[in-house]
Amino acid sequence: MAAPTVESKLCAALAPTMLIAMPGMEDGFFTRTVILLVEHGDQGAGGVVLNRMAPLDLDTLLKSTGLDSAPSGPHPVWVGGPVQPQAGLVLYLDEGRKRYDHDVEVMPGVRLSASLNVLRDVAAGKGPTTFGLYLGRAGWGPGQLEDEMAKGAWLSTEPDLSLLFSTDGDQAWRRALSAFGTDEQHVVREIASA
């Protein structure tokens, strides 16, 4: 077995992580976003935007798939990113219930699944109780994310469980900056003085 290269160590170190869009992000879709990066390697990187609310709620989405009931309480649906916006992903806490096809452990205690069976179980009251449903995902080609990070487009930090399942929307971005130890005004001043 070959020894790991510096590049492969960097790849392993990036996922899972949270990416916080810097003020001044030029891509309008990613302005003020927080992303959970779930994969990173030679083929590129991918994750889900945690704080971009979709224009429909879980009840509406479940009914559109033929599932009539929904769990009680507000459950927004999120736009996970511009890649494959018709595909759904469910990020959920592993509460010791069953595992689903096509699900992966993102980090200890947190799983991500593309299985419709998760939604069926949620609708029937048998699925995970702490979850987020994302339409689409964020993706980067080989070297693209590293280039954006080198240009200062993203801050990278450890995943924060309180932000993974937050319903704060735009406030989640400010909370992520605060958890990083900074705020929007400080970052803007730093950029201006650079």
Image (tube, rainbow, N blue to C red):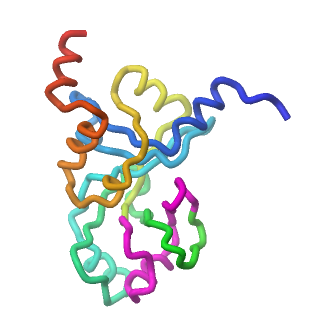
Image spot of residue 24 (x, y percent): 22, 27
Question: Total label count?
Answer: 0
Residue in front for this viewpoint, 160 or 2: 160
- The residue most toward the top is 194
43 lies above or below 51: above
Vertical side of 88 occupied by 144: above or below: above
Magenta-colored span: 104-132
Residue 126 forms part of the magenta stretch:
yes
Give the residue drawn at x 43%, y 21%. 150
Looking at the image, residue 166 sits to the left or right of residue 120; the answer is left
Residue 181: % across, % down: 27, 32
Asked if the stretch drawn in magenta spans residue 115, the answer is yes
> Quarter-wise, where is residue 132 in the image?
bottom left
At 20% from the left edge and 10% from the top edge, which residue is drawn? 193
- Residue 39 position within the rendered picture, expressed as x and y whole percent measured from the top left: 54, 46
Query: In the displayed structure, would residue 159 be above or below residue 97?
Result: above
Q: Is the C terminus in the top left, top right, bottom left or bottom right quadrant?
A: top left
Position of residue 106 in the picture relative to residue 81 (left or right): right
**Residue 17 place in picture, x, y as percent:** 46, 42
Which of the two residues, 65 or 178, is positioned nearer the viewer here?
178
Q: Residue furthest left?
A: 185
The structure residue drawn at horizontal position 49% and vertical position 60%, both measured from the top left corner, is 110
Q: Is residue 57 left or right of residue 103?
A: left
**Picture quadrant where residue 134 is located:** bottom left
Residue 114 is left or right of residue 119, and the answer is: right
* Residue, far right: 1
